[in-house]
Amino acid sequence: MTVSGGASVVLGAQWGDEGKGKLVDVLAQSADLCCRAAGGNNAGHTIVANGVPYDFHILPSGLVNDSCISVIGNGVVVHLPSFFSEMDANIKKGLKVDSTRLKLSDRAHLVFDFHQLCDGLNEGELGRGSLGTTKKGIGPTYSSKASRSGVRVHHLFRWSEFEALYSKCLEGMKKRYGFEYDAKEELERYKILAERVRPYVIDTIPYVHKAIADKKNVLVEGANAIMLDLDFGTYPYVTSSSTGIGGVCTGLGIPPRKIGNVYGVVKAYTTRVGAGPFPTEQLNSIGEHLQSVGHEYGVTTGRKRRCGWLDVVVLKHSHALNDYTSINLTKLDILDQLPEIKIGVAYVHNGVKYTDFPADLEKLAESTVEYETLAGWMTDISKCRKYEDLPPNCRKYIERVEALMGVPIQWIGVGPARDAMVEKKL
């Protein structure tokens, strides 16, 4: 049952970097609220509006729409220096950002510089088995939160309590990792930041609920993607939050029956950043082609992304967890010059075929991929704006992905520009 006036949600259906920001930008043009529910400044979107590229890491990308109010929910972890540096950089580019357009949950947890330090130390401990995190302090902050030693935004406004909680959190991290740290300098900075952030801070739960009750258009912007989910992704090569539809409920305080449409964003091939299993990865000329033509570098880290064919086992796992209403297939134009295109449809382990994504990464590493091969279209589709304008083989690829996933594809990205999107009638 879909409740009228429920929040619409955009979620990454693979390992992130699918191009969620562009769909959010399109939908935010008619949104009253655009909300973030999880993650921190480890996420990254680039949106090009009026020829200006805006990079978003912690701020909701709905800020590009002047009439849209952006909300950072309780499930997000916030590094205030980065919050303000990102805000200031986008303001310099002409974006309007102030406390009337941006709201921050008083329940959100704070990321401190020592969390970022611990993130690097943790990666160092893991050595060759490192997870490939962004070292933004996200994991250690969620660890502080789960161990009930974290510090929330509202604590900033009771300074003596804040200092005590900060010291307790820092001491716990120092005992775990053993490092020296200048707490006095950071506390002095946060005394100033507390006053700067105060106008933005509200209780976002009633604020979002009232917007839904008033039949406002509420949009939720997912961060990362389901294959990086702490429970359902390729653990331990995952992020530290719930990146699926469950994280939207807990990260904004929205009950399931207040969720409306759920849009999955799927890149027309597969990429991931950092370590971890990647069954359809192409360590060959195909992978190099996808990487170079697709400009596959991380917005947050600048790291080269690993590239491979589309993986339907991943996508069906993703759909089972998030129940997508429809799909945005992105960067289809990157496949334009490939004479044949493959889709991973099943895995094979010790001669046995299976189609459910496994928890056991050793089993996954020992598995091979069964592919379907389709003919390419060898045509530039970047100027197409109607579904009928796409080449026949291109439409066959789209319709085969729809059939394999069991979800309709509503939007097709054919280039980086804001208007380079084909909408397909459902």
Image (spheres, helix red, strand yellow):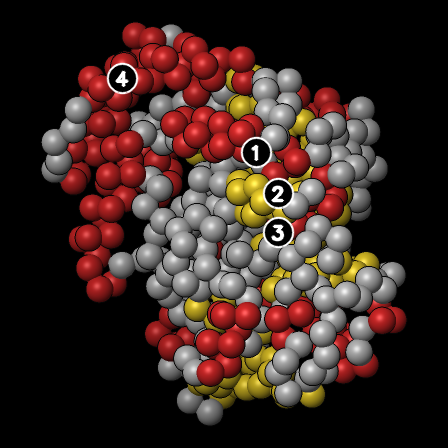
Q: Which mark is residue 93?
A: 1
Determine the CA span between mark 3 and mark 1: 21 Å
Q: Earlier in the sequence, mark 4 or mark 3?
A: 3
Q: Amino acid at mark 3?
A: Lys
Which residue is identified by label 3?
20
Q: Residue at x 60, y 55 (%)?
A: 19
SS at badge 3: helix
- On-image quarter of the C terminus: bottom right
SS at badge 2: strand
Which residue is identified by label 4?
187
Residue 370 visible at all: yes
327 to 42, vertically: above or below: below
Nearer the viewer's eye, disc 4 or disc 1?
Answer: 1
Q: Earlier in the sequence, mark 4 or mark 1?
A: 1
Nearer the viewer's eye, disc 2 or disc 3?
Answer: 2
Q: Kindly indicate the quadrant of the structure image that contains residue 249.
A: top right
Coordinates of residue 100 in the picture (x, y in percent) = 64, 18
